[in-house]
Image (spheres, helix red, strand yellow):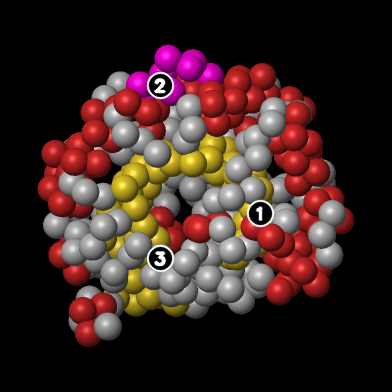
Amino acid sequence: MNTINKNIKTFPQYDKIKINKLTYYELEPEENIFSDVVADITHRCNMTCKNCYIPNRNVPDMDIDRMIDCISKLPNRTMIRIIGAEPTMRNDLHKIIERIRATGNRCTLLTNGLKLASNKYVVSLKKARLSHVYISLNGVDNNDWYEEIDELRCAKVKIMALKNIYANKFILDTGTIIVKGVNDEAPLRMLNLLKRENIVHEVCRFKNVGQLGRYMKESGDENYTQEQMITLISKQVGVSEDYIWEWKNKPIYQNDHVEDCSFMFPLESNAANKFLHRSGIWIKIADWDVGNKPTAFPGQTRRGRITEDFKIAPFFEHVKLNEGGY
């Protein structure tokens, strides 16, 4: 903790969410405390989603040599989250994955999935030793939802990508932002989609709208609270609210710490003893709503972000301080 304290800076109130104070610090790679480190390898994208934490597109692609040097210095084996905007915009993505894996770190790809509708492309990522894929499915299988949230009728392409990911035996996560009044039935449609495609091992992540970058809903009555998401999901997936609440204060992964703003639970209670929560269907609920907090997940130490200077900073705080910039 001394390493963190000596690097802490505080920033005054500065934006429309009326933040009182934001605590921020940067660490040398050798001092990293985060189990997951985000690498925004490009700010380019092939979509114009209405919810995007980095909608600025004029930032040069990340220098991969410097990124590899940075993560090579991390003191412990770390999950490197390959993010964009849209990381598949880089033609050298498979080379980036190979180089990350060569450092001894793990990596996961967070993608809108459009390019993964090509099985040949998915196979190339597998050959590069990628093992985890997180695909955003805000509209699930409903083109009207995709058009309203992501401004693109892309359900067919998304479902093809989902099938390719699963067929090639990646560890699969789906991410869905529940936008109040738009895709309220997303949890039920997601389970029906998984059943239809015979996908039996997966983590379905649901979150409300986060007030970062470009977003559709302000915090408050316009957005779902975590409690409301629990009620909504309970009614649609066939488990009681009491069962979901039992998991609220449990670690997300084995030997992990408890987060107040996110947690996960298995649809079937007998899956609870399976290693790393990867057997069966699991649901993660994340509260990205800022409310009166300085940012989502304030003070968390699970997600770091590689800065412009190739240091490591807390993810949400770094994103908030760099809105409209990096």
* Residue 79 drawn at (x, y percent): 34, 53
Residue 140 figure quarter: top right
Amino acid at circle 1: Ile
Residue, disc 3? 302
Residue, disc 2? 123
Q: CA distance from mark 3 to mark 2?
A: 30 Å
Q: Secondary structure at mark 2?
A: helix
Q: Secondary structure at mark 3?
A: loop
Q: Secondary structure at mark 1?
A: strand
Residue 113 in view (yes/no): no
Q: CA distance from mark 1 to mark 2?
A: 27 Å
Give above or below for 25 relative to 280: below
Kindly identify the residue that appears in the image at 48 percent across and 17 percent down: 119
Which mark is first along the chain, 3 or 1? 1
Name the disc covering residue 238, or none. Answer: none
* Residue 127 drawn at (x, y percent): 32, 26
Q: Is residue 260 left or right of residue 148?
A: left
Front-lying residue, 189 or 267: 267
Amino acid at circle 3: Arg
Front-lying residue, 222 or 209: 209
Residue 122 part of the magenta-drawn span? yes
Residue 208 part of the magenta-drawn span? no
Residue, disc 1? 283
- Give yes or no for contact between labels 3 and 2 (Cβ–Cβ under 8 Å): no
Front-lying residue, 95 or 210: 95
Q: Quick one: label 2, few (<14), some, or many (20+) residues within 10 Å?
A: some
* Residue 54 drawn at (x, y percent): 44, 44
Residue 244 in view (yes/no): yes
Q: Which residues are magenta?
A: 117-125
Kindly identify the residue that appears in the image at 81 percent across and 67 percent down: 241
